[in-house]
Amino acid sequence: MKLLYPDTLESLQNMVAEALAEETALKIEGCGTLDGVGRPVNAQKCISMKNYTGIIDYDPAELVLVVRAGTRLREVEELLASENQFLAFEPPHFKSLYEDANAQPTNQTIGGVIGAGLAGSRRISAGSARDYLLGFTAISGRAELFKSGSRVMKNVTGYDLSKLMTGSFGTLAIMDEITLKVLPAPEVAYSCIVPTSDMFAAQKIVGQIFASPVEASGGVVVPVEIAKALSLDIGGQGAAAIIRIEGIEISVLDRINQIRELLPKTKECYLLENQETTELWRALCNGKPLSESDQIWQISTPPASGPFLFKAISDRTYISGFLDWAGGLVWIAGKSENLHNIIRTELASHGGGHATLLKADINLRQHISVFQPLPSALHALEVRVRDAFDPRHILNPNRTIPAIAP
Amino acid sequence: MGVPSPDSEILSRRDDIIAGLKSLLPDECVLDSLTSMRAYDADGLSSYRQTPLAVVLPTNVAQIASVMRWCKHNEVKIVPRGAGTSLSGGATPLADGILLSLGKFNKILDIDYENRCVVTQPGVTNLGITHAVEDAGFYYAPDPSSQIACSIGGNIAENSGGVHCLKYGLTTNNVLGVEIVTMEGEGIRIGGRHLDSGSLDLLGVLTGSEGLLGVVTEVTVRILRKPSTQRAMLVGFESALDAGKAVSDVISAGIIPAGMEMMDNPAITAAEDFVNVGYPREAAALLIVELDGPSVEVDALLEAVERIMRKAGANSVRLSHSEQERIDFWSGRKAAFPAVGRISPDYLCMDGTIPRKALPEMLVKISSLSQQYGLRVANVFHAGDGNLHPLILFDANIEGDLERAEAFGADILRHCVALGGVLTGEHGVGIEKRDLMGEMFNETDLKQQQRLKCAFDPQHLLNPGKVFPQLHRCAELGRLHVHHGKLPHSDLPRF
Ligand SMILES: Cc1cc2nc3c(=O)[nH]c(=O)nc-3n(C[C@H](O)[C@H](O)[C@H](O)COP(=O)(O)OP(=O)(O)OC[C@H]3O[C@@H](n4cnc5c(N)ncnc54)[C@H](O)[C@@H]3O)c2cc1C
């Protein structure tokens, strides 16, 4: 595959125009960290955005950051930290998840974060990448430069194409400049760990806390093996609820007391302070306890369904995993060749939602649907929306939906 | 500005169209007399009135689907309508189209506390959702001032905001799923009680699409637990410029209040005359800042905010000490539009957004434009997120006043864009700002947006004439013009 490294808007636009004229498919990547997500792309050329870098503007007082798409996530995070700000949607760093599959050292780009629509544990309280992309400019599959959105906090002028770009996996357009909303970082963060007999009991606690005014910024349920992998001491119990509280210190301590009052008398809750909390949630967001596994799924489902779905799947095959998003995100790692069928059937009968194969070898990704199959009318609509941006299917064909046979 | 001119061929088919609709719906669901349609001839942009061909009021989704299928087949345009409170003319009827009212879709379908969401029909009011869950201590966060009247379906279509959006986000950040019926008459579900879709975020793009992509027939929204404490602060300033700067200072200090609103002197006086809750009449500007959370947090942050305000030049600061007092503090702000309605026969409400730091500059600009046009203005701002609502006062009975007010408004919006802002922060483009879209977007941008429209409604039958200044045929929009790897005029700079 021929690698192309645009570093100016003109070069990027010309590359797409050329591919369009020749009708050759383009693989689009940032640094390739997330190469392992989605279906394999068959293309003659690859546009790598790794040289398309630079901070265009950072205005902390306006809570706005403008970067070129290839700018590294880590660089952005460091820049924001220097002003006590952060990306509230907590994009996971998936590098460690795929390291084996991808020998080259990689480094996630902001374009990749938006393109994959990533969000960490704070999804449940602060939102996802979609909620922080204020605007962008991009080259469409028609080789045209267009923009949408703006750099102000509130904007309903025209369709909100930022939402469409988020999670589109490079199939609509290649982003040039990306404008993000940033937020003040919390002063302190504490975790409350509540050991319980099993995941259902833990989910009950998480559900109770999220239905209270505590304003937790994360709610996770882990079974004992995952607690062990995270070096959490859960005193011989079968599972634990993990709650994260962030904000100004006086408020965090007060809310921890509120949590203690909410808990049944028999339940203990122990605390992790700042540093440990940061590390723990990084590990959870990045799926670290499962990273050794070859097949990993993420399932979004109504929060209360989480433990039931997890149990139903584990009754049929050996899996490990945990629940994030207050129960609404089920992480599953397993080996079974049939895992995708088990997940899709159990999901349909346990609350519904969508399951995405986050990591698997190329063979499996080629042969099963990596993303949740859509009902036919919705599928047809999605194809038409895609065609509106990339009528010749030159951008990442096959990545999200099987390419139409030539 | 203006409503599109009707197609006489369609007007001549009026009787057939009404007969066709009556074959699909019970008679009482089709209004076709002038008197019965009067209540529907305008939305909140009431200077623009037009009687539609007919008004249909379906009672179930199958009826909506059959009406849409029939209209597609017969090439009849449809304007969806919720409660008709749009301020941008989104629900202004078309003389050669039918108005599809969701007024009878007024039931809440499910309250799911376990998953903290509510499934509702689109005609339920925004406040109706909160009312349904408040006994259990929950609420629906986005709170447009029109919340007692506007429908949740209209909120989705406009991506409405409210005074608490600073902390809790707009509609788009609080909706989990919708069911839409497309122009094909097909029902499509997007999202549900879970987060995100795992494919293209069509929910995100439907939100704020102003009724141009599909008719929303069911909505699932997130509900939140009421914060344990909410307290508000009223801060008076002698100078509006200082108040504008104070807003920036609070955010810069890393504090995101639940809401941070600003009113200028004409708005303060009008509101105080209306609700009488002790707003400082002499102040040039008033800020209302609300903080919520545990009481220790609220108290600590209020102290910090007060310090910032004093430093910025505030000369009066009042804190709410009871829930009633807090509600009183807000009552003037929430009633600002009707209050201004009492001091002027008519007003136009603008809705641009600018970067916060440009607030002082914008205030100066608005007052100089006010002199230039000889029209008074009362300013109400969602200051925390830079969203402005200058209310331009005029008298429609004075010849040329409406046109002058519109020209004044357009100048304000142009200036918003020049300052790095946008035409509309929460009210939508509709017909009101349609002809200004070129200020923000070039032809390529607008055509790309219309291609999206073509994916949903290739015949432009759903709410045409809104949002886009010029309608291009979908076949034309789909054409590619690339030759030998070169774009036309690829030598020209693209910015
Ligand atoms: C006094 C006053 C105060 C206001 N304050 C605010 C405020 O604070 N914040 C704010 O954001 N807005 C505010 N608004 C504007 C308005 O209330 C909102 O835009 C509201 O969301 C409109 O809802 P509606 O049900 O009245 O919709 P309508 O006015 O009936 O329609 C609005 C648009 O939505 C479309 N639509 C309606 N229902 C559907 C559906 N089911 N499916 C598809 N399309 C549909 C219509 O075609 C139209 O384009 C205010 C208006 C008034 C009059």
Image (cartoon, rainbow, N blue to C red):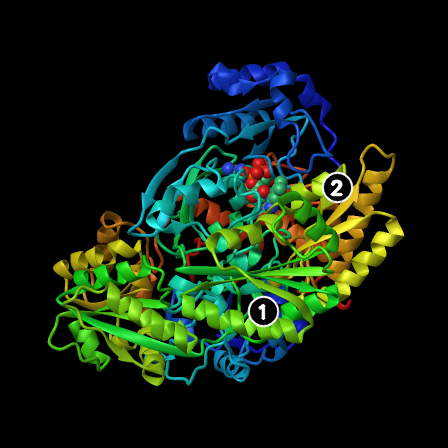
Which residue is found at the position 48% from the left and 82% from the top?
A74
Work out whether B281 lies above or below A266: above
Q: Nearer the viewer, residue B392 or B173?
A: B392
Residue position for label 2: B343
| The image quarter in which residue B405 lies | top right
Chain hosting mark 1? A
Name the residue type under label 1. Answer: Ile
Name the residue type under label 2. Answer: Ile
The residue at label 2 has a CB less than 8 Å from ligand 1: no
Residue A36 coordinates in the image, percent (x, y): 37, 71
Ligand 1 image-quadrant field: top right
Kindly tell me whether residue B172 is visible in this rendering. Answer: yes
Residue position for label 1: A178
Mark 2 vs mark 1: in front: 2
Say few, some or many: other residues with alpha carbon within 10 Å of mark 2 (under 14 / 14 to 19 / 20 or more): some
Work out whether B63 lies above or below B363: above
Q: Nearer the viewer, residue B400 or B33?
A: B400
Q: Is residue B108 left or right of residue B484?
A: left
Residue B392 coordinates in the image, percent (x, y): 76, 47
Which residue is found at the position 30% from the left and 75% from the top?
A191
For marks 2 and 1, give the CA distance.
44 Å
Q: Is residue B181 left or right of residue B313?
A: left
Which residue is found at the position 55% from the left and 14% from the top?
B19
Callout 1: helix, strand or loop? strand
Q: Is residue B126 left or right of residue A61?
A: left
Callout 2: helix, strand or loop? helix
Kindly tell me whether residue A46 is visible in this rendering. Answer: no
